[in-house]
Image: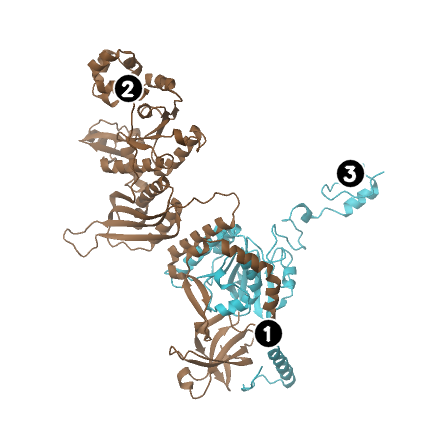
Chain colours: A brown, B cyan
């Protein structure tokens, strides 16, 4: 059995810093508990603020110090997301104490090709969550958890090395020994090695059976079963912001933390998310105000299930940029239920058609997120003789470009038929102009010859009679002509077919299109 | 005795030990830059890109373009007096080739509504085409340039045709040219003819003008190579049928003979 313990020494500070905007998080911060400083970050410590000082002393040393309260629920959420990130490597993960996670990885060593590689990948997976992690591996869970509190990046391959490492650890390290720290010091026991050299019966009588049992579990002489963490079926995470967020940019910074947790939860079950929802709860301006909505909800659906934090962030940013916040936001919540379990995409060196299509889907999603869904259009021809109805415009579906198989076959078949195809293309003249005006533009006439921008048009070919549309009330009875402008560009004109129906269509020449 | 053949022109310095004849031969056949590296050329030669260009379908044009076709990974500027001079028919063959390779073509803000049957007649596949409109945006110019940059940088799209906003600043075009380095395919930027006076970062610039029915006059304003002084005349895929062509010829002759320009239009059933 090989247990890896992940200890987060600055968990409370980091979870507090996550609620602040980025610019403020690098300033001196400290957590206060019962008017005494509980923890301070590096820039506060540089100014002289220490844990245990009185609040007034700390503020005198650093006037710009930002003080916050430690919140257990907030710390637990952050620790749980670290555990979820660890669940991607092994199912046997459990929380240990207030700020540690232990995981049993013996069964995963072969898949991940050794302890060093596994530890490196674990380190990379925990990077986006933004916590400082001490990682220690040893044959027992309790031993790893104890050692992780004092040192970082240690590997004890067997019990002898573990015993040696524990012997050098301070005596007050175990939970059960902390209450009796002065007793241990009076006895002259400074390290755990000293404690372990004492006779067991005397140790149990003087310092308590609990300490003996904990040391036995740490050394591997006593079974220490751990309850593995159960992954929740749906993702629900909250973040209460320290300062109200007035702009969408500030909301985005908070949402980044939540998205990192979502990605950790997804990687624990090797799944991809299809849609998620961001709920922004508002601060009511007046207590009895019912007109303002309590929360603004933003639903984001993805065309292709994805786990890429960068891509989700881009989509969220574009949607938030288009959103108008009606009131300042105090709390953010992220929910995700709709997930898809599918094999991950292959990472390849050279772009293959498959990876290119996946990238194309994301590109179209990004464009639609910024410009609006209706602005990215695809065309399709409609069987209608009326030129303004012959083209249907629809919003593009990004998921259409995911499938490669049938398209590839079509491409191959077409490239083989290309010489015949292009020969056929050359043979038929083009009868429709590329540029169409949806409503005909009326043209001036001079001696019954149409004028475009004051210059006469030379009618060259026609008439092509189009009479259609009696079934939907937009009857079109027109004679179409191809005409040449003074420079030589070709345009498509029409005039109403019969003089009798001229009143309906309008009299005279109309410009319908230009041959591009 | 020195060998009768001359060494390949990699090492151009004539050997001191070689005979005077060999030295003269080596000196005369001086090393030409294009054999050293594809990006080198002399001023009077047509430059050659690292990659082969996309054939345009018009051999007379391909002979004048560096790389033998529309350049990849670079912008191509086309300057038109107004839409509808034949620019789509000029580009249709190159775009059809890109689509046949299975890649997507994107159009940005076409100047009028696009007719899908017309594109099909030109040989393009309508379901391999996306149209992106930014007219309805709050800041259309900024959004159009952003979308263009994203599409060019991603490199997943086969060809891009964009109608740029009028009076665009030169540094914006330069930024698009830098983004186009990641785009493996042609990128056509269509602008107004008055942009001729402005310098542009695009390595290939053409000015288009209609020169008669189904004829296009091209002037190569800028290319990697010597300037082309005379405009090229290309015959576009025809819109007019043969009978209409004959009528046009007859009209032109009659007009040259009579010298009278305006004629009354008459309804005659033409084939």
Query: On the picture, is A377 further left or further right than B186?
Result: left
The residue that label 3 is drawn on is B15
- Total marks placed: 3
| The N terminus of chain A, quarter of image | top left
Query: On the picture, is B39 further left or further right than A67?
Result: right
Quarter of image, res A375: bottom left
Q: Residue at x 43, y 58 (%)?
A: B144
Residue pushed farthest left?
A: A288
Distance between the Cα atoms at labels 1 and 3? Answer: 60 Å
Q: Position of residue B237 (x, y in %)?
A: 59, 69
User: Which is more toward the observer, A369 or A306?
Assistant: A306
User: Which is more toward the observer, B177 or B240?
Assistant: B240
Q: Are marks 2 and 3 on the same chain?
A: no
The residue that label 2 is drawn on is A215
Q: Chain of mark 1?
A: B
The residue that label 1 is drawn on is B212
Q: Position of residue B109 (x, y in %)?
A: 45, 63
Residue A198 appears in the figure: yes
């Amino acid at each position: 059995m090989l247990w890896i313990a992940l200890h987060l020494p600055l968990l409370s500070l980091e979870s507090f810093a996550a609620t602040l905007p980025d610019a403020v998080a690098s300033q001196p911060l400290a957590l206060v508990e019962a008017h005494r400083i509980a923890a301070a970050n590096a820039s506060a410590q540089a100014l002289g603020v220490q844990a245990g000082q009185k609040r007034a002393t700390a503020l005198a040393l650093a006037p710009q110090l930002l003080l916050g309260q430690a919140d257990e629920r907030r710390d637990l959420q952050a620790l749980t997301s670290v555990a979820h990130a660890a669940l991607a490597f092994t199912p046997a993960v459990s929380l240990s104490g207030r700020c540690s996670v232990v995981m049993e990885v013996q069964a995963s060593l072969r898949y991940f090709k050794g302890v060093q590689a596994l530890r490196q990948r674990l380190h990379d997976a925990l990077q986006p969550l933004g916590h400082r992690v001490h990682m220690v591996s040893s044959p027992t869970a309790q031993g790893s958890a104890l050692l992780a509190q004092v040192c970082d990046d240690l590997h004890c391959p067997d019990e002898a090395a573990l015993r040696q490492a524990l012997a050098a650890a301070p005596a007050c390290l175990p939970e059960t020994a902390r209450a009796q720290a002065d007793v241990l010091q009076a006895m002259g026991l400074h390290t755990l090695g000293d404690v372990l050299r004492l006779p067991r019966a005397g140790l149990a009588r003087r310092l308590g059976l609990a300490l003996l049992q904990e040391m036995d579990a740490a050394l591997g002489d006593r079974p220490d079963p751990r309850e593995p963490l159960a992954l929740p079926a749906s993702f629900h995470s909250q973040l209460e912001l320290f300062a109200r967020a007035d702009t969408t940019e500030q909301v985005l910074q908070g949402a980044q933390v939540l998205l990192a947790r979502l990605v950790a939860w997804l990687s624990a079950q090797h799944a991809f998310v299809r849609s998620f929802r961001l709920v922004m709860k508002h601060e009511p301006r007046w207590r009895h105000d019912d007109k303002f909505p309590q929360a603004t909800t933003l639903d984001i659906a993805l065309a292709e299930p994805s786990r890429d934090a960068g891509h989700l962030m881009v989509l969220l940013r574009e949607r938030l940029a288009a959103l108008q916040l009606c009131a300042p936001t105090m709390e953010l919540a992220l929910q995700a239920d709709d997930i898809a379990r599918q094999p991950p995409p292959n990472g390849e060196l050279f772009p293959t058609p498959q990876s290119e299509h996946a990238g194309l889907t994301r590109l179209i999603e990004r464009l639609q997120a910024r410009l609006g869904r209706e602005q990215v259009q695809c065309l399709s021809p409609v069987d209608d003789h009326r030129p303004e109805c012959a083209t249907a415009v629809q919003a593009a579906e990004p998921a259409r470009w995911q499938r490669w198989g049938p398209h590839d076959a079509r491409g191959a078949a077409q490239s083989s038929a290309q010489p015949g195809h292009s020969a056929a293309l050359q043979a038929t003249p083009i009868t429709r102009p590329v540029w169409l005006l949806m409503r005909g533009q009326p043209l001036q006439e001079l001696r019954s010859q149409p004028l475009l921008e004051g210059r006469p048009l030379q009618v060259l070919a026609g008439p092509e009679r189009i009479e259609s549309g009696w079934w939907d009330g937009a009857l079109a009875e027109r004679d179409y002509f191809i005409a040449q402008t003074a420079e030589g560009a070709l345009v498509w004109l029409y005039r109403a077919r019969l003089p009798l129906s001229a009143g309906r269509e309008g009299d005279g020449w109309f410009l319908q299109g230009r041959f591009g | 005795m020195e060998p009768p053949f001359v060494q390949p022109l990699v090492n151009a310095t004539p050997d001191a030990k070689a005979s005077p004849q060999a030295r003269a031969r080596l000196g005369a056949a001086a090393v030409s830059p294009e054999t050293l590296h594809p990006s080198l050329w002399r001023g009077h030669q047509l430059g050659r890109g690292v990659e082969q260009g996309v054939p345009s379908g018009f051999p007379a044009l391909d002979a004048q373009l560096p790389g033998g076709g529309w350049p990849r990974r670079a912008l191509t500027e086309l300057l038109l007096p107004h839409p509808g001079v034949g620019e789509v028919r000029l580009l249709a063959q190159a775009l059809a080739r890109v689509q046949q390779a299975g890649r997507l073509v994107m159009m940005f803000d076409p100047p009028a509504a696009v007719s899908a049957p017309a594109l099909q007649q030109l040989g393009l596949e309508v379901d391999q085409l996306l149209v992106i409109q930014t007219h309805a945006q709050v800041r259309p110019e900024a959004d159009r340039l952003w979308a263009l940059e994203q599409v060019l940088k991603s490199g997943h799209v086969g060809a891009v045709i964009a109608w740029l906003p009028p009076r665009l600043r030169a540094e914006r075009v330069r930024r698009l040219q830098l983004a186009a380095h990641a785009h493996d395919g042609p990128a056509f930027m269509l602008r107004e003819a008055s942009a001729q006076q402005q310098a542009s970062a695009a390595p290939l610039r053409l000015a288009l003008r209609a020169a008669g029915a189904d004829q296009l006059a091209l002037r190569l304003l800028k290319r990697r190579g010597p300037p082309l002084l005379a405009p090229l005349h290309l015959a576009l895929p025809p819109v007019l049928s043969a009978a209409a062509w004959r009528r046009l010829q007859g009209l032109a002759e009659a007009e040259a003979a009579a010298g009278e320009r305006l004629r009354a239009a008459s309804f005659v059933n033409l084939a």
